[in-house]
Image: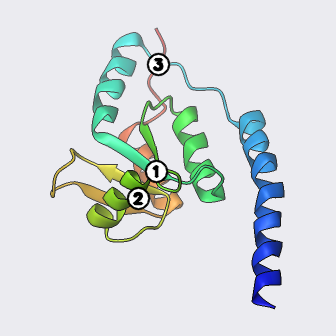
Amino acid sequence: MRIVIRYFFRTLRLILTPVMLISEKLTTPKPIQRATQAQAAIDKACEDLALYQFRACPFCIKVRKEMSRLALPIEIRDAQLDPEHKADLIAGGGRGKVPCLRIGKEDPQATWMYESDDIIQWLQKEFPAESPAE
């Protein structure tokens, strides 16, 4: 019976993954427009950030959509397909759970933030969308 259940969920995942990824592409909002200098400062601040994620995770998709809306060039690390990123996530954050935002350089003092709502709230606070465009 376990094998039937396992194959059922694998098949379900195979069917839903493309649907979720296409849906993400179709519903991702357009990035906000900022002044060139403001966007350059944000690009610089994002150099110390990395999002550990799974490609088809709905919570990861939610975070990626917000990153796109805020025009944040945060490095995306796939912890599902890349064993090195998964090992970094477990070693640094203590859990293999995604999404996880690493805040800070790659050192022991980096902060690891889990939970999509917390990540989105932090991104909105750190990178507000109110900056006027040039």
Question: The residue under label 1 is which amino acid type?
Answer: Asp
Q: CA distance from mark 2 to mark 1?
A: 6 Å
Q: Is residue 113 above or below residue 45?
A: below
Please name the residue that numbered disc 2 is placed on: 86
Please report whichever mark, 2 or 3, sits nearer to the chain's N-terminal start.
Answer: 3
Q: Is residue 24 above or below residue 113?
A: above
Residue at 51% from the left image edge and 33% from the top image edge? 70
Q: Are marks 2 and 1 in contact (CB under 8 Å)?
A: yes
Q: CA distance from mark 2 to mark 3?
A: 34 Å
Question: The residue under label 2 is which amino acid type?
Answer: Lys
Estimate the x, y position of residue 20 in percent, counting from the top left: 76, 49
Please report whichever mark, 1 or 3, sits nearer to the chain's N-terminal start.
Answer: 3
Q: Residue furthest bottom?
A: 1
Q: CA distance from mark 1 to mark 3?
A: 33 Å
Residue at 61% from the left image edge and 41% from the top image edge? 65
Q: Nearer the viewer, residue 15 or 25?
A: 15
Q: Judge depth for marks 1 and 3 and give the one in front.
A: 1
Q: Judge depth for marks 2 and 3 and give the one in front.
A: 2
Please name the residue that numbered disc 3 is placed on: 34
Local packing at callout 1 (Cα closer than 10 Å; few below 14, some 14-19, many 20+) is few
Estimate the x, y position of residue 126 in percent, counting from the top left: 36, 42
Residue 50 in which image quadrant: top left
Estimate the x, y position of residue 73 in percent, counting from the top left: 44, 30
